[in-house]
Image: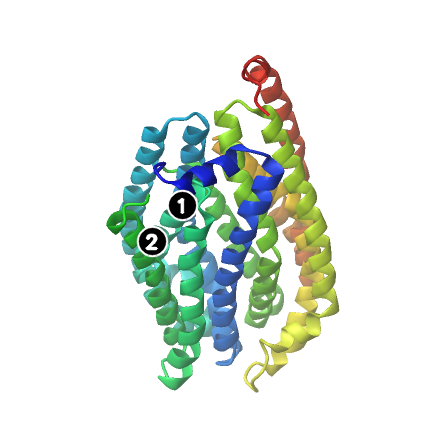
């Protein structure tokens, strides 16, 4: 992993000035996330042309799918953090071993959960009130869940490259996947007349391409641990989505789920810069923690939070100003035209969610980076389940505010939970400073 000039340069970046490292690592990470969201957005846009039921079906399947994709991101985050800490501690043998274990584990868990999900999907959809969208959801889900290994394995391989600061080879496969999916979507859905199943096949085939590219680099060119808490975080996010969808059905029916699904695609696009910065922070935090360099940890965290808020405010304003134009891309056919005003309304309200989330994301990523997964998990639990879901139910049903109450509860809960995480992160960094001060001063680290 550490035997060529490019790799040595990557190591120098992640062990140097944290502000410079965050900028250099986050920009390509943002690009990769933009590409990922582009093909997710393409799925939603093309599927929306089939009607509101088809779009709502995507909304019912996506949280379940993300629970399982969370396995890949959890394994990847664990490997990323562990490899980064071993790099900081100058132990390349253990770094290589951590990457190998992450890859093997991803194969095992994806096979197990594919079987479980195919057996349990239909009862879950019935219990969640999929109703008239059941046929669409079941046909789409059978394909994406049947090929779960493609998505989990791809996420772990990408994390291995990111942990070394090798963002170029982490981004190129994602770019290829995204471009191919955007091309295949309309061909499979409309030209081949496969409908919603076409969207699923386009996603599977496109994602398989990234595996082929990264596998070539690792095993042919030879260029190259599960963080349970990180996996559980993804499960929590998806569980919250299931809860919110259920509440929306109770308040306004499946059309509300369709509008929320479309709006959240835009929210997720706007969260890409924060996730890019947070992913860079995860690597930098791991390296700083492994090297007992509290100054880099503190500087990196503070810088990430500040940049996250600045970017989120700008993006929220753009969401509000262009909400109608954005909504129109999901309502371009007669079958989906009625969704336009609902989607625009949802985008305007949920723009505030974008502003509420940066400090929570950075706190969780920092804790994951230093190997304190349980702390990251607790931050997520507070934000998503303890605050967002409870306040959404309180405002939406107990106080009787309906749809706007559900949205308000999600936004306020996100901000309050993130604030708790921010305070906890600052206290952790202060404690780490005290514990590592002697070593830091003796080594003269900067």
Mark 2 to mark 1: distance in Å? 9 Å
Q: Give the residue drawn at x 61%, y 16%.
A: 434
The image quarter containing residue 138 is bottom left
- Judged from the image, the secondary structure of the residue bearing numbered disc 2 is helix
Q: Give the residue drawn at x 37%, y 75%.
A: 198
Q: Which residue is mark 2?
A: 214
Vertical side of 84 occupied by 275: above or below: below
Q: Residues within 10 Å of mark 1 (few under 14, many from 20)?
A: many
Where residue 349 appears, x then y in whole percent? 71, 61
Q: How is the image coloured?
A: rainbow
* Disc with the residue nearer the chain's start (2 vs 1): 1
Q: Which residue is mark 1?
A: 161
For residue 8, the mark is none
Where residue 97 appears, x then y in whole percent? 30, 34
**Of 433 and 55, the residue lying toward us:** 433
31 left or right, relative to 124: right
Q: Residues within 10 Å of mark 2 (few under 14, many from 20)?
A: many
């Amino acid at each position: 992993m550490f035997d060529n000039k490019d790799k040595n340069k990557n190591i120098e970046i992640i062990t140097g000035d944290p502000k410079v490292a965050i900028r250099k690592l986050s920009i390509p990470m943002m690009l990769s996330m933009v590409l990922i969201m582009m093909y997710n957005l393409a799925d939603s846009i093309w599927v929306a042309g089939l009607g509101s039921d088809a779009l709502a079906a995507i909304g019912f399947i996506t949280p379940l799918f993300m629970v399982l994709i969370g396995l890949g991101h959890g394994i990847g985050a664990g490997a990323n953090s562990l490899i980064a800490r071993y790099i900081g501690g100058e132990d390349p043998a253990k770094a290589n071993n951590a990457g190998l274990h992450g890859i093997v584990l991803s194969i095992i868990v994806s096979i197990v959960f594919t079987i479980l999900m195919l057996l349990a999907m239909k009862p879950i959809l019935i219990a969640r009130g999929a109703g008239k969208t059941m046929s669409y959801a079941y046909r789409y889900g059978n394909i994406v869940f049947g090929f779960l290994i493609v998505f989990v394995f791809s996420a772990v391989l990408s994390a291995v490259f990111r942990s070394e600061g090798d963002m170029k080879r982490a981004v190129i496969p994602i770019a290829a996947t995204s471009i191919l999916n955007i091309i295949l979507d309309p061909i499979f859905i409309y030209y081949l007349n496969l409908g919603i199943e076409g969207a699923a096949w386009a996603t599977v085939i496109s994602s398989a391409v990234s595996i082929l590219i990264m596998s070539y680099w690792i095993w042919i060119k030879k260029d190259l641990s599960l963080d349970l808490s990180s996996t559980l975080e993804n499960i929590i996010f998806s569980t919250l989505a299931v809860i919110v969808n259920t509440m929306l059905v109770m308040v306004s029916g499946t059309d509300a789920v369709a509008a929320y699904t479309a709006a959240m695609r835009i929210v997720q696009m706007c969260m890409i810069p924060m996730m890019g910065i947070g992913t860079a922070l995860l690597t930098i935090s791991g390296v700083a923690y492994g090297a007992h360099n509290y100054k880099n940890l503190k500087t990196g965290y503070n810088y990430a939070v500040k940049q996250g808020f600045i970017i989120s405010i700008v993006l929220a304003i753009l969401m509000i100003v262009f909400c109608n134009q954005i909504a129109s891309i999901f309502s371009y056919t007669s079958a989906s035209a009625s969704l336009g005003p609902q989607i625009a309304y949802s985008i305007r309200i949920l723009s505030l969610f974008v502003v509420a989330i940066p400090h929570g994301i950075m706190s969780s990523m920092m804790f994951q980076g230093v190997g304190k997964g349980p702390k990251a998990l607790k931050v997520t639990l507070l934000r998503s389940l303890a605050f967002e879901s409870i306040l959404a139910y309180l405002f939406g049903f107990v106080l009787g505010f309906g749809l706007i109450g559900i949205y308000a509860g999600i936004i306020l809960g996100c901000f309050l939970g993130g604030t708790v995480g921010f305070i906890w992160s600052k206290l952790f960094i202060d404690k780490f400073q005290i514990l590592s001060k002697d070593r830091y001063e003796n080594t003269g680290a900067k």
